[in-house]
Image: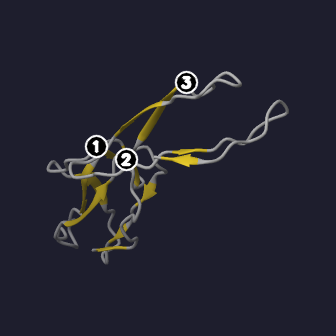
Amino acid sequence: MSWTSSEPTDATVGSDTYTLMATSDSGLAVALTIDDTSSAGCSITDDGVVSFLNAGTCTIDANQAGNTNHSAATELQRSFWVSPALSLALANANPEFGVAANFTAAASGFESGDTMVTFWVDDVGNDHYVAGCDASA
């Protein structure tokens, strides 16, 4: 039995699904399941489509049962990290014209040890006023 797809390189909570595939030399069906030790909330369909639900390590087992002609294959495992989805909330995002804009920002979804967040404000202007300068913090 062998994997016929590589592990995902950018698994993030809520990102696009990923299709994992494995085959068996015997031609028997390979069952893909989420291992009980997975710390991430990931799910998998019968056809190998993986969804990323929570951050952590996602471990998937591949098993091929035996039959009268073939022994059961040794279980394969594939593990990969699922990154948290970062979210950003801005308050007062539409200030009144001519009034100083004060924004309050809150970020969530960070892992222990993350220390930097960059915020950009891009004032593009409109028909009523000229664009200001960009700012970051």
Residue at numbered disc 1: 41
Which percent across, then down, holds residue 58? 26, 54
Residue type for callout 1: Gly
Which percent across, then down, holds residue 86? 40, 43
Residue type for callout 3: Asn
Residue at numbered disc 2: 52
Nearest-to-viewer mark from 3 and 2: 3
Location of residue 70 (image quadrant): bottom left
Residue at position x 18%, y 66% from top?
75
Residue at numbered disc 3: 92
Proximity of marks 3 and 2: CB atoms separated by less than 8 Å: no
Proximity of marks 2 and 1: CB atoms separated by less than 8 Å: yes
SS for callout 3: loop
Spatial separation of the CA atoms under disc 3 and disc 1: 34 Å
Q: Is residue 25 left or right of residue 37?
A: right
Residue at position x 34%, y 52% from top?
116
Of the two numbered discs 2 and 1 on the same chain, state the one appearing first in sequence.
Answer: 1
Q: For mark 3, does the 10 Å Cα neighbourhood hold few (<14), some (14 to 19), or many (20 or more) residues?
A: few
